[in-house]
Amino acid sequence: MGNILDKSDFVGLKNQGATCYLNTLLQTWFMTPEVRECITSAKSDVALVCVLQNLFNNLEDSGNTSLRTDELTTLLRMNVYQQHDIEECFRNMINKLHTAMEPEQNILKFYQINMIQSLKCSCCTNLIQIDCPFLDLPLLIHSANSSRKFEHLEMALREFLKEETMEDDNACYCDCCNTKTKTKIRYYFKHLPRILTFQLKRANIDGDRMRYQKIHDYVTLPLSIEFNKSQDNCNEWILKATRGKENNVQNTHCPESTDRGRSFAPTQAMQAGYAVDGEGRKVEAVQDQSDQDSSKEKERKYELFAIWHHVGGFGGGHYYAEIKSVADGTWYCFNDRTVEQRGKDISLRSKTAYLIMYRMTETNSISAPEGLEMHFIRFWKFLSEIFARVKNNLPFLTTSPQERNCQLHNVMAEDIKIY
């Protein structure tokens, strides 16, 4: 799905002052085939979509050394000297595009996670299930009382998914019992998107100084994450164990921090995990996509695709991204105007990783009918391009049959390489 770039030289984006967070987001969208195709193929005359389309077209030209984003920041009325939290920028940009694009060409569908919050009364066993859409799942690095550290992303995710008992002062009101009762509460995955995003909550409150501080603890990231369909609930995806499948090398790719104002300051709306607009209001979720999770599909696998790093303290610092090319599996570091190739392997243990994205593997990302249709469309486009090239070279029809066959073979050979 999407046009897969196959090139070794990518174009950087210039930092206008404190726009490293925006550059990181834009490069990630450009490197995500389905997202890039969604934006570039959108039939919209909205200024934001047009500006992004023009920027992505220029990023495809490896002749450029680096590009400016002035047109975009001017359109969005951004103060380029005031840095913002990248997760908050991610939400705002998603929501702006959500309102600017047609439903069938909406970027939100690639990221939205449909979770179910399940509440079960311990007295009458009354079960309440609430749909909860997330753009990214906020994961704790420390337990609520800081008594435990979650040194692996899987540990943090299981902490998020574990069942808890709400009782005493925290008991929930049961409509059937007409009183507060002990209640068991948990979250589970109902629909898994193509891009599964996690936010490591690296900010907590210093109780002594009564202010936010950043957590610099190391967290190990799994190379892949797998889910199985629950045997008891066909609408529930269960996390499989992944620990032990990755290396534990310390992250050595950490550019020096540059304090540029407010860069790491999560808002309340951001911490909640829901989709919100620029003013913190919760936006309407896209139509339920759970029907896309085929009942016949029993497994889903995701591979590590992008890591957004934050270097520095709370209230200041610098963002950059490590992103894997879908074309050949090579990792690249996008740090404003600088793009460096990292090779096939990167460090999976990091104290700067903030937002982590996993991309659904191609083997289970689409159903069979959808896959056949997609390849048929690509092949038809391929044939159309050949016919167009032949039509543009009509003079060769006056040549001998041998020369004509040779020229036609050369034209088709070039297009077959592209296909």
Image (cartoon, grey):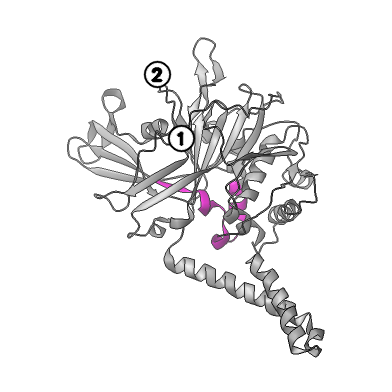
Residue appearing at x 32%, y 37% in the figure? 186
**Residue 131, visible in the rendered structure:** no
Magenta-colored stretch includes residue 106? yes
Q: How crowded is mark 1: few (under 14 residues within 10 Å), some or many (20 or more)?
A: some
- Give the labeled residue for mark 2: 145
Left or right of 154? Residue 18 is right
Span colored in magenta: 94-115
Secondary structure of residue under mark 1: loop
Residue 159 vertical position relative to residue 303 in the rendered view, above or below: above
* Residue at disc 2, secondary structure: loop
In this view, the residue in front, 387 or 295, is: 387
Please identify the quarter of the rendering in which residue 312 is found. Answer: top right
Is residue 387 part of the magenta span, yes or no? no
Residue 226 appears at what percent x and percent y?
Answer: 39, 45
Relative to residue 89, is residue 349 drawn left or right? left
- The amino acid type, in three-letter code, at marker 1 is Glu
Which residue is at 58% across, 53% downward?
98
The part of the image, by quadrant, that contains residue 342 is top right
Residue at x 68% of width, y 52% of height: 7
Q: Can residue 419 be seen in this view?
A: yes
Q: Which residue is denoted by mark 1 in the rendering?
A: 246
Amino acid type for the residue under numbered disc 2: Asn
